[in-house]
Image (cartoon, rainbow, N blue to C red):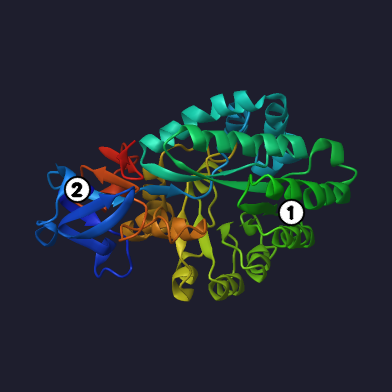
Amino acid sequence: MWDRLLTNCNVATMDPAVPGPFGAIEDGAVGIQDGRIVRVGRRIDLAGYRAGRIENLGGAWVTPGLIDCHTHLVFGGDRAREFEQRLDGATYEDIARAGGGILSTVKATRLASEEELVDQARPRLQTLMRGGVTTVEIKSGYGLDVASEMKMLEAAKRLGETEAVRVVPTLLALHALPPEHRASREEFVRLAVDEMIPEAAERGLATAVDAFCEGIGFTPDEVRALFEAADEHGLRVKLHAEQLSNLQGAALAAEFGALSADHLEHADEAAVAAMAAAGMVAVLLPGAFYALKETRRPPVELLRRHGVPMAVATDCNPGTSPVLSPTLMLSMACTLFGLTPEEALAGMTVHAAKALGLEREVGTIATGKAADLCVWGVNRPAELAYWIGLPGPEKRIVAGEDA
């Protein structure tokens, strides 16, 4: 006897092995046991199975739980004032070079205790959860010293331990140059390489290492040194690349077998080809594109042509993407970047799972996967992207239990 059987539902499995759009099984059913999916198929084929709880979903659509694979959810303070400055004509680069941007959040984050960071981040996380998120990546990157970066990662860990959501922590070791290292850039890179990465790895606080490869961030050579250290300590890598310019960061990330390259508005075909060869995911971030009023879109057609999976994420952060609606990102991925609704939903399920190295665990509704699911009161799955900022699902299931 199974623990639970969801029946009289339509299932958007998002499984490439299931033919048809969305990998859909109409008039379907999903069996759950011990927090995992044990059967998925047509209702008539599962009619003879018994379960402790049999739930008639009244024709609702069931999707994998949404995966937000790129966020900066833990931080101190806010940057609403910079929003006003951008409306007055200041650019992201103007604000950053004047000591604002990331550095203003660094100051607030350093001053906050771990408890305060958890308390500030929790409402943001809960909002994403209400929107259907069952797995979320959380980056550090606003501490910029060893103690503060570890404090951020500890805060992310505590959130995962106290909320019904899977938290995937990333050490964003090279995000910005802190004020105390303006005249000693090499020393800060050495700090990231020789102290941040070893401590995060030893304490098990991160599964991957990230960097911001840009003219206002860090050079390819600096990123290479960081990635070599990550590799030595058994951590995967990913990269903020080609957001504002083309420094060939995506190709560099491909050399290290990176999980993903993120943003990519300025990526060229050579970068896309390198990503394809390395089996990487392109993480598209329409919230930042919108908030910064960018006009150059990521090379979606090139990504399609080369078969690079496209993930979609909120990039929730205090300065350039204060976004807490995953379904809004599905809609924007279609209207701003030209994705189809199926591509957008794949971007927050199956492809987002791959971007986190979790493709064997979550991202599709398939036998053996974790029973992380969302139940939506819609007539067809395209509505998740069609409605602009659709409220969250009717039911959110994590490890087989309502959450």
Assign a secondary structure to mark 1.
Answer: loop
Q: Residues within 10 Å of mark 2 (few under 14, many from 20)?
A: many
Q: How crowded is mark 1: few (under 14 residues within 10 Å), some or many (20 or more)?
A: some
Q: Position of residue 46 (x, y in %)?
A: 14, 58
The image quarter in which residue 352 lies:
bottom left
Contact? badges 2 and 1 (CB < 8 Å): no
Q: Name the residue under label 1.
A: 215
- In this view, which residue lies farthest toward the front? 1
- In this rendering, position of residue 195 left or right of residue 282: right
Name the kind of residue labelled 1 in the image: Gly
Looking at marks 2 and 1 on the same chain, the residue that comes earlier in the sequence is marked by 2
Q: Which of marks 2 and 1 is in front?
A: 2
Q: Name the residue under label 2.
A: 6
Q: Position of residue 42 (x, y in %)?
A: 15, 61
| Residue 169 sits above or below residue 308 on the image | above
- In this view, which residue lies farthest toward the right? 183
Assign a secondary structure to mark 2.
Answer: strand
- In this rendering, position of residue 175 left or right of residue 127: right
| Residue 153 sits above or below residue 104 on the image | below
User: Which residue corresponds to the image point at 52% horizontal and 56% vertical from the top-left?
Assistant: 356
User: Which residue corresponds to the image point at 31% horizontal and 45% vertical from the top-left?
Assistant: 400
Q: Position of residue 145 (x, y in %)?
A: 77, 38
